[in-house]
Amino acid sequence: MKQKKNKLIMWGCVIFLSFLLNFQVKSLDQINQRLENVYQERYPSYLLVNELRQSTFALMLHTRHYIEKNDPRYEQYYHDIIAIRAGEKPRPKEHEGVYWQYGIVEEASLHSTGQQVSLHALIEANHFSLEELKLLQRAEKLADELVITEQIAIDASNGVISVDNQKKLLIGETSKDFSARIINDDTYEQLKQTFVTMLNQIITLLDEQTDARVEQVRYQRELIVMTIMLTMFLIGVNICVIIANFFKRWRRVGKHARREIKS
């Protein structure tokens, strides 16, 4: 009777541990999904920061090209990017690729039927932390300040200078020379460097916070893996005990049968 009770207890432990193992495996799947979600949530953040960087560099490039070459295409490209970033024109397809990276605007891209939403709105709607969002807002403000100087330079290249900006003209300086000077002077370069430094800080912060979230989830995964291994070990121990008891009982039955045969 006692052996039968022990056997039932052992099988009960195996069944319980099997259910526990199933629960642990499901928990592990959920944690792996959470880890994947961390990367999926942060990836758009990197894309948006990169878009702010690349679109700003594209505006710089088109400004210089227009002033140097006086090609109206570059002025059009400049204003198109401003309109796209402000949500006044549809975003080009593959906007995170060649469009921003090289500052090249193709006619097919300009007439795309992409989403019409401002970069600022996308940033506000994304999963940025409060600290990241504050830095991004400062970076956006710096980008806007660069745009102000660039638009003054483009207007001056077209011969249009406001009364306030006419006071900034050097003696004998033409409007063309003025436009070239203000996008190459120390003030503009310092503003550009501050913008780049700010974006680098944002990327560093993104990396740190992403790594912290990933490390937390990985720690939870390691705990689950350890409990799974422990549960599998206990199941194995119980099964080994059950098998050992089976063979022990089988040997006793065999001995008893041999004794009856001899007698």
Image (cartoon, rainbow, N blue to C red):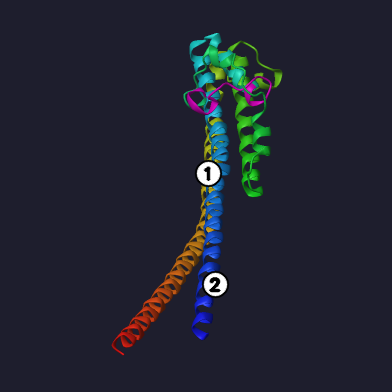
Write down the quadrant of residue 51 in the picture.
top right
Q: Residue at x 49, y 16 (%)?
A: 65
Q: Nearer the viewer, residue 222 or 141?
A: 222
Disc 1, disc 2: CB below 8 Å? Answer: no
Q: Which mark is residue 12?
A: 2
Q: Residue at x 37, y 84 (%)?
A: 252
Up-down relation of residue 22 to residue 184 (above or below):
below
Name the residue at the right extreme: 163
Write down the quadrant of residue 45 in the picture.
top right
Q: Residue at x 67, y 25 (%)?
A: 86
The location of residue 207, given as percent across then percent down, is 51, 48
The location of residue 205, given as percent across then percent down, is 55, 49
* Badge 1 or badge 2: first in the primary sequence: 2
Question: Would residue 172 be seen by someone viewing this image from the given angle?
Answer: no
Q: What is the three-letter code of the residue carrying label 1?
A: Ile
Q: What is the three-letter code of the residue carrying label 2?
A: Gly
The location of residue 221, given as percent across then percent down, is 51, 59
- Which quadrant is home to the C terminus? bottom left
Name the residue at the left extreme: 262
Q: Nearer the viewer, residue 54 or 124?
A: 124
Disc 1 packing (10 Å; few <14; some 14–19; many ≥20): some
Up-down relation of residue 13 to residue 57 (above or below):
below
Q: Which mark is residue 5?
A: none
Residue assigned mark 1: 203
Q: Is residue 137 magenta?
A: no
Disc 2 packing (10 Å; few <14; some 14–19; many ≥20): few
Up-down relation of residue 34 to residue 73 (above or below):
below
Closer mark to the observer between disc 1 and disc 2: 2
Highlighted magenta segment, given as a residue range: 84-99
Label 2 sits on a secondary structure element that is: helix
**Is 263 on the left-hand or right-hand side of 40?**
left
**Is 83 on the left-hand or right-hand side of 256?**
right
